Image: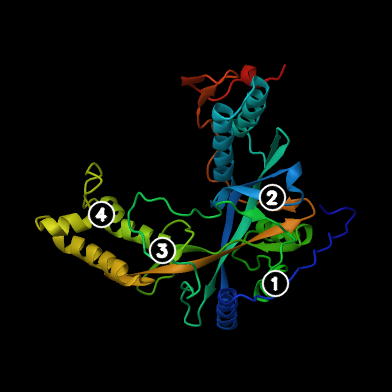
Amino acid sequence: MKKHGVRPAARPVLVRIPVEPVEAAIEADAFDAASRNKLAVRGPLFGVASQSEADGQRWQVIAAITNGCPQQARDDLQSKLWFRAKDEAETEAERRALLGAVARLETGKPSEVTVLGTRYRVVRAEEYAGLAPDGGVELPRPTDPEPVLPEWTRTTETAAVDDGLVLDPDAPVTPLQAAEMLTMRSFAYKGSRYPGNVLRDSARAADTHPDVLLLPTSFVVVERTGDERWGVGGGLHATPQDARRALDFSLTWFRPRQAGVIEVTAGPDVDARSLVAEGTHPDLAEMKVLADAADRLRAGRLNEVQVGDTVCRIARSRRLLRWGPDGPESQRPSDVTMVEPMALHPRLDAHGVVHNREEGTRPEDTDTA
């Protein structure tokens, strides 16, 4: 926090030189991209991080920093604390403490809650991407992580974004990462497209949270029809292959239902591929366009595929998180909340009993003796 008008000092950046061949190749890829790409900012993302006394200055991400709204992050935290009270609390006192935090999150908009010696904070990151000279969004790099065998099964679990991520402001970084971190320290919104309060909060954050941490690269499906601008077509994924699998599902299963070509009540195995195989659907031509595009995606492990007059691309998404003397930046006053707080689970009493017909947490169940 700023005290007496003095800006907090920025931390020194500890740089390590890559020595392993794979890491050196990743660094070379990063240098090539930095030399030819510009940056385009998409906007803020929100998640939840926790810190206990044993963590020191480090924070642990417990809800992926992928939400477009701070309330969605609070809802993630509410659910985690409710289930911890239900499944993990060993005493009534522990359960009451956890339910007290749940009650706050059901009705209020706290940026941080502390319970049982652990701080839980809504944290804010900035999402941005590289833009090639032709204006296209940066594709996955050759050194980005890829599985040996691509997984296309919809129900198979794969790595989640930010799974197990520890935020450590003093962790050593490579030379290219250090250069990006130092460059982005001065980043702030500019221009008439942003409201005044957004511009003021952005400028203030550069003072109160002068350090920058780079979060792991993630991958997202982006789309463009004709000469339109690129638009995001889904959430963030941990690997390019996870994004391809999401695009395959969207093309063959979700989009036909969204367009009303396949009934929403159709079985889970009914998709564009199955209808093309049957050959009797009235919209067979449209189904064939979607199925063919998805098949090309699978066969070539492509990062871009044409679907009618729309181009679908797997793009790299980058995120930075600001850091100050008290840790990671939380939501700003000007950040937009798209949903209001509410009780997400049935009432759970201090004895661990779930009352399924009653919503929320009653005060008498959270008051400590």
Up/down of 73 relative to 365, above or below: below
The amino acid on which the numbered mark 4 sits, given as a three-letter code, is: Pro
Q: Earlier in the sequence, mark 1 or mark 3?
A: 1
Up/down of 166 relative to 357, above or below: below
Q: Quadrant of residue 43?
A: bottom right
Q: Earlier in the sequence, mark 3 or mark 4?
A: 3
Horizontal and vertical percent position of residue 94: 66, 26
Up/down of 12 relative to 250, above or below: below
Q: Do residues under tags 4 and 2 come within 8 Å of each other at their CB atoms?
A: no
Q: Earlier in the sequence, mark 2 or mark 1?
A: 2
Q: CA distance from mark 2 to mark 3?
A: 28 Å
Q: Quadrant of residue 367?
A: top right
Q: CA distance from mark 4 to mark 2?
A: 42 Å
Horizontal and vertical percent position of residue 93: 68, 22
Name the disc covering residue 59, or none. Answer: 2
Q: Is residue 199 left or right of residue 306?
A: right
User: Quick one: which residue is furthest to the right in this view?
Assistant: 4
Up/down of 14 relative to 111, above or below: below
Q: Which residue is mark 1?
A: 178
Q: Which residue is mark 3?
A: 241
Helix, strand or loop at label 4? It is helix
Name the disc covering residue 256, or none. Answer: 4
Q: Quadrant of residue 266?
A: top left
Q: Earlier in the sequence, mark 2 or mark 3?
A: 2
Crowd class of label 1 (few under 14; some 14 to 19; many from 20; radius 10 Å)? some
Horizontal and vertical percent position of residue 131: 52, 75
Q: Nearer the viewer, residue 247 or 230?
A: 247
Q: Is residue 129 left or right of residue 280?
A: right
